[in-house]
Amino acid sequence: MFFGKNDHLVGLDIGSKVVKAGEIIASKKGFSLKKFGMLQLSPGTIEEGAIKDPENAAACIRELFQMHRIKSRNVAISIGGYSVIVKNIVTQSMSEDDLQDTIHIEAEQYIPFDINDVNLDFLILGEADTSPNQMNVLLIAVKKEIVSDYVNLIKLAGLNPCIIDVDAFALQNIYEINYDVRSQNVALIDIGASKTSLNILKAGNSAFIRDVSLGCSQINHRIMSETGCDFLQAEKIKLGQPTDTISAENIKAIEADAVSGWCAEIRRALDFFYSNYPDDAIGQVILSGGGANIPSFRETLSTQTSIEVTTIDPFQRILKNDDKNDTDYLSEVAPQAAICLGLALRRVNDK
């Protein structure tokens, strides 16, 4: 099925450091990129998924839409981090309507929050391997407070929030469009500024999802500590701007320390998957987010896991419209665009 005129949504990825917006047009010929842009937030506007300065964030979103002449007001956003819980659970086989009536009872044993404080959703994955009378269900819980904060932010920016997704699922959306999803088990890992999202796909379905509070801003904060500079200057130093305040060797050591922590957390997640699926192997790790651009991270992770590690190409099967978009720029920021473009694939009233 393809987008209809009234189904169109703008993907809006609101990170702790950068806001990204993208539009994808679909037709019988396939998918093509209409618009994509990103704009940096002021430091402290959003921290670890919590909106600290909604007025500033809304102004940044409005500016981004104006810069790229994005006219559509309907958006799809996503949430991740500690406020989101995603669990694979097993329940007695029943219809979707019946599960809708009982999901709160089923969820209470899995959710570490007061069940009255969360919004619940689910997806029936199919019959359980262990019993024909049971089924596998993907359970999603998000704190109501966080949902309310993001809805209010989008409305403050003058937009209409149509869909609230989960970061890991948005990443899966763009992966499924561009790759052969059932050829092997794959770990999708997005390293953002302050959060890492991991989604392991087994036979095309999410088998394990985890978000951890690790990301590229760790490097910035270490540089700030060493030099006394502000966050924006630390970002420039991290990206290679010459400076007399810190040596290249020290920057490399800071980066290596951060990469070591990321790899350790990822190995723990992979070990958990292997403990639950001892007969399965993960054939490939696909990275996205700003961390995907760090060569030492890709190399270290591949060495430590003995798995092929590559960087996602969210435009692999999406036409970039060379006459309308700066293709060199899109190639440069491609890993960072993945979640945004995954959101841009959503439609009004999607499940």
Image: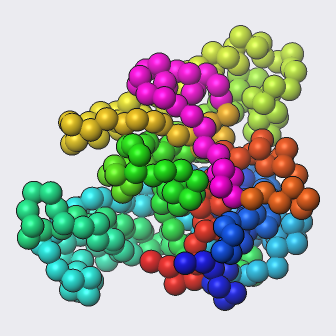
Q: Quadrant of the C terminus?
A: bottom left
- Coloring basis for residues: rainbow
- Residue 275 percent across, percent down from the top left: 21, 37
Would you say residue 290 is visible in this rendering?
yes
In the picture, measured across the screen, residue 92 lies left or right of residue 296, that is left
* Residue visible at 31% across and 35% down in the picture: 281
Residue 342 belongs to the span the image colors magenta:
no
The one nearer the camera, 286 or 140, is 286
* Residue visible at 38% across and 43% down in the picture: 185
* Residue visible at 78% across and 30% down in the picture: 239
- Residue 188 percent across, percent down from the top left: 48, 45
* Residue visible at 56% across and 22% down in the picture: 299
In the picture, measured across the screen, residue 301 lies left or right of residue 226, that is left
In the picture, measured across the screen, residue 171 lies left or right of residue 35, that is left
The one nearer the camera, 187 or 40, is 187
The one nearer the camera, 214 or 228, is 214
Would you say residue 75 is visible in this rendering?
no
The one nearer the camera, 4 or 121, is 4
| Rendered position, 30 above or below 301 | below
| Rendered position, 235 above or below 138 | above
Total number of numbered labels?
A: 0
Q: Which residues are magenta?
A: 294-318
Q: Quadrant of the N terminus?
A: bottom right
Residue at the extreme front: 29
- Residue 167 percent across, percent down from the top left: 52, 58
| Rendered position, 291 above or below 138 | above
- Residue 137 percent across, percent down from the top left: 26, 66
What is the quadrant of residue 223 in the picture? Answer: top right
What is the quadrant of residue 3 in the picture? Answer: bottom right
